[in-house]
Image (cartoon, rainbow, N blue to C red):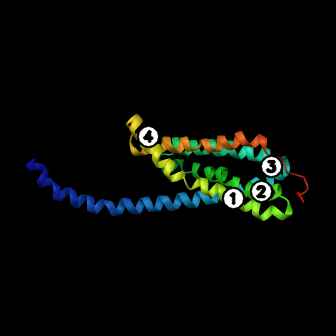
Amino acid sequence: MSERTDLAPEVAAIKAGIEPVISGRLSRWASLTSILINIGAACGMFGFGVVSQRIGRKPTFAIALIAAFFSTVSVFWFLKDIGQMWMVPVMGFCQLSLFAGYAMYFPELFPTHLRSTGTSFCYNVGRFVAASGPLVQAQLIAFFAGLYGSSGADATRFAGITMCSIFVLGLLVLPFLPETRNQPLPE
């Protein structure tokens, strides 16, 4: 036990020197990830508009939901080093292209006198539901950490993959929605 007390000041000094370096690197990686996601998102949003004009809203949503599911699962499952960062803009492309679809599709669902209200309602109900995401994620991380005795990183991976089921839910709802491509706006 005396050895441990003798090493404690040295360990504390090493820790104090390393923590700022690690913190700075984590900040840089978070910033780079955000930039890459947004580059992918910009391309995905443009692409969604082009594709949905050619093949229709519902088929484009189906493709985007499937792509979002697989790209997100891939990032959570496989991304482990800098050489795999190419997956991040692909995930941004696939996930965030859906928002361009919402901007086109929601207004086409409602008659003129309800268009703004209906569109706002759809966007904001989604936001209220999404607000529970961090709580659900925390519960899933705790569940997986306890279930498998896995590390925090593995539990976070499993939780992220599980949360991708929201894209599957979107696919299940999609057949019940109307196709609005080349249809007049409802009056």
User: What's the residue type where badge 4 is placed?
Assistant: Phe
Label 1 neighbour load within 10 Å: few <14, some 14-19, many 20+: some
Question: Helix, strand or loop at disc 4?
Answer: helix
In the rendered image, residue 139, in percent from the top left (x then y), is placed at 46, 46
User: What's the residue type where badge 1 is placed?
Assistant: Tyr
Nearest-to-viewer mark from 3 and 4 = 4
Label 3, label 2: how many angstroms apart (C-alpha)?
A: 11 Å
Nearest-to-viewer mark from 3 and 2 = 2
Sequence-first disc among 3 and 2: 3
Label 1, label 2: how many angstroms apart (C-alpha)?
A: 9 Å
Label 2, label 4: how many angstroms apart (C-alpha)?
A: 36 Å
Which residue, given by chain and number where applicable, does mark 2 sit on?
106
The structure residue drawn at horizontal position 44% and vertical position 40%, both measured from the top left corner, is 143
Q: Name above or below for residue 70 compared with residue 182.
A: above
Q: Which mark is residue 143?
A: 4
Which residue, given by chain and number where applicable, does mark 3 sit on?
57
Question: Helix, strand or loop at disc 2?
Answer: helix
Residue 71: name its quadrant: top right
The structure residue drawn at horizontal position 90% and vertical position 53%, both measured from the top left corner, is 183
Which residue, given by chain and number where applicable, does mark 1 sit on?
123
